[in-house]
Amino acid sequence: MKRLTSIVLLLVLVAAIPAGASTFLKLTPQELVRGSAAVIQGEVLKVSSFWEPTGRMVVTEALVRVEDKLFGSAPSVVVVRTFGGRVGDFTVEAHGFPKFQVHDKVLLYLEPERDGASKVTGYQQGQFHIVRDQAGVEYAVPASDDDARLVGADGRAAAPAKALRLDELKDSIRHEAQRAGRPILEN
C-alpha cells in the first residue's frame, strides 16, 4: 500500500510539470559576473546549426562581432555555441537555452569551452537582446522562453530578470566585476 501511494504521488508530481519545460536555478547578477570569463556586447553575424561530431545532438554556433568588452578577454568575433537548432527537417527545441538570429544586438555573459568557442553563462540568463525605444534609448531585454522555469535555491519559482537601460546594466556589470577583482577593459 505504501508503495502504491508513493507511485501515485510521483505520477501527480510528474503531471504537474509542464510538458517540455526546462528548469534552471536562478542566478543573481553577482553570480553571473563571477561565473563568466567575459561579458561582451555585440552583433550576431552568422548562425549555423549542425550535428556535433558524435552525431548525438544538434548544436548551434553564432558568430558575434564584439562591439564592447565589459570585462575579460574576447577576440573581435566570438564563436558562441549552444544546444539545439535545426538541421534539415530535424529540429531540437532547447527550452531555456540561448537562441540567436543574424543581426541581433546582444549582451552576453560568456564562459570558454575547451575548443576555443564560448557558451553563455547561466543559459538564457546570460543573454540579453538590445533594443532601442522610440526616444533612441537602448534597453537590455533578458532572453526568455515560456517553456523554461527559474527556481531559487529554496526550490520556489523565481521571477525572471527585467529589462534595464543598457547603460545601467553595463555600469552594474562593471561595478560587480571590480568588486570581484576582475580587470575592467577600456574601450
Image (cartoon, grey):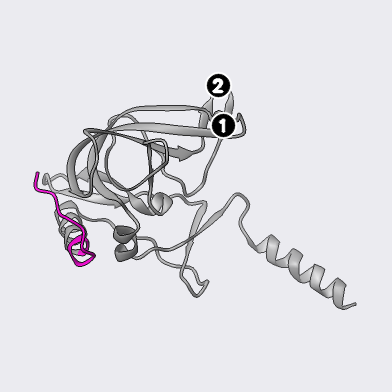
Asked if 47 appears above or below 158 in the picture, the reply is: above
Q: CA distance from mark 1 to mark 2?
A: 8 Å
- The magenta region covers 176-187
From the top left corner, tell me how far across and down residue 151 is, in percent.
48, 66
Q: Which mark is residue 88?
A: 2
**From this viewpoint, which residue is outermost toward the top?**
88
Asked if 142 appears above or below 9 in the picture, the reply is: above
From the top left corner, tell me how far across and down residue 130 is, in percent.
24, 44
Query: Toward the viewer: 178 or 165?
Result: 178
Q: Main secondary structure of the magenta part?
A: loop
Query: Toward the viewer: 82 or 167?
Result: 82
Asked if 179 appears above or below 68 in the picture, the reply is: below
Quadrant of residue 73 within the rendered picture? top left
Quarter of the N terminus within the rendering: bottom right
Tell me: 3 left or right of 88.
right
Tell me: 24 left or right of 133.
right
Which residue: 34% across, 63% down? 31
**From this viewpoint, which residue is outermost toward the right?**
1
Can you identify the residue that label 1 sits on?
91
From the top left corner, tell me how far across and down residue 14 is, in percent.
69, 61
Q: Callout 2: 10 Å neighbours few (<14), some, many (20+)?
A: few
Which residue: 58% across, 23% down? 89
**From this viewpoint, which residue is outermost toward the left?**
186
Residue contact between numbered discs 1 and 2, judged by CB atoms under 8 Å: no
Which residue: 42% across, 50% down? 123
Query: Toward the viewer: 179 or 105?
Result: 179
From the top left corner, tell me how far across and down residue 143 is, in percent.
36, 49
Looking at the rendered structure, the kind of residue marked 1 is: Thr
